[in-house]
Image: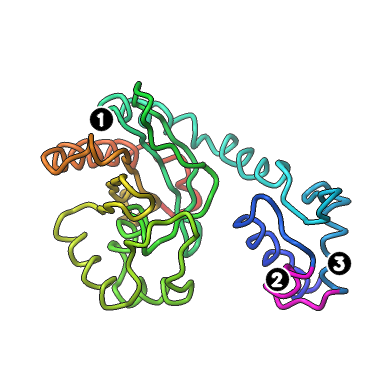
Amino acid sequence: MSQLVIDRLLDVVELLVEHPHGISLSEISRRCDIPKGAAHRLVTSMVERGYLEQDASSEWYRLTLKTSGLGFRFLAESGLTDVTQPILNRLGQQTKELSRLAVVQGQSLMWVAKAQGSPLALRYDPDIGTPVVLHATAVGRAWLSTLDEEEALGIVLKAGFEVPARFNRNVITNAADLRAELAATRRRGYGLAIEEGEVNTVAFAVPVTVPNGKSVGTLSIAGPIMRLSADRYEEIADSLKKSARELAQIWPLRQFVGA
């Protein structure tokens, strides 16, 4: 398989991750800059292997659970969920809100595990297994704040300042504002996002830094703004930092991060 085919395959997978209900062949061809004939051969092969399926009525293509299953199988084999879930469960119970773990994947973060600590009907509970929008989330900025500033800005500029439609409009849209917020994140010691991902929600996040000094992921708490008022900020941040230190000491993916 040539490098070009591999690049196209990964471009299609990454595009379809953002469109769980599927998109048309023409849109795949246009968005991934692949000739339509080549795009058709590629998706046909992926359908035959079970990684894509085609809707019978719309003829749109979408990822199957086999694709996400590869990631979850890797997490299970790595031992990540075995050691992180008890920490997430305890953090969720302490704060009575949603706790989540995102793991660094190259120049991005991916949600991989969560625990819902709220017993109430009003909950914030987004999907696991989706990439993090770095500049527009507490999680993303908590991680970016650990990097060299120019490296962090370069990562965001490469991805762009666009956000998914589900995001509130109260998000950072330029490099100057991002620099300022990363500086504020470093001063606070945690990432903070107020009504950015969704209206009436607030999120907090801290990096998970393993003994070699490298940040390998982030821990976060998120919930309705009516319960997470300003007088709880330091309490939440302290709980996050304690859990992040505990997780860093037993981090199960050390062979991949050189820890």
Earlier along the polypeptide chain: callout 2 or callout 3?
2
Q: Position of residue 1 (x, y in %)?
A: 82, 68
Magenta stretch prevailing secondary structure: helix
Q: On screen, 162 above or below 247?
A: below
Q: On screen, 109 above or below 74?
A: below
Q: Amino acid at mark 2?
A: Asp
Earlier along the polypeptide chain: callout 2 or callout 1?
2
Spatial CA span between label 2 and label 3: 15 Å
Q: Position of residue 177 (x, y in %)?
A: 26, 73
Residue plotted at (49% across, 33% down): 81
Residue plotted at (23% across, 34% down): 227
Q: Is 117 contained in the magenta span?
A: no
Spatial CA span between label 3 and label 1: 49 Å
Q: Which mark is residue 95?
A: 1
Give the residue number, with chain letter if any, for mark 3: 40
Spatial CA span between label 2 and label 1: 42 Å
Q: Nearer the viewer, residue 86 or 118?
A: 118
Q: On screen, 54 above or below 78?
A: below
Q: Amino acid at mark 1?
A: Thr
Q: Amino acid at mark 3?
A: His
Question: In the image, which is nearer the foreground, mark 2 or mark 1?
Answer: 1
Label 2: how many Cα within 10 Å (few below 14, some 14–19, many 20+): few
Q: Which mark is residue 7?
A: 2
Q: Position of residue 90 (x, y in %)?
A: 32, 25
Q: Which residues are magenta?
A: 26-36
Residue plotted at (34% across, 58% down): 143
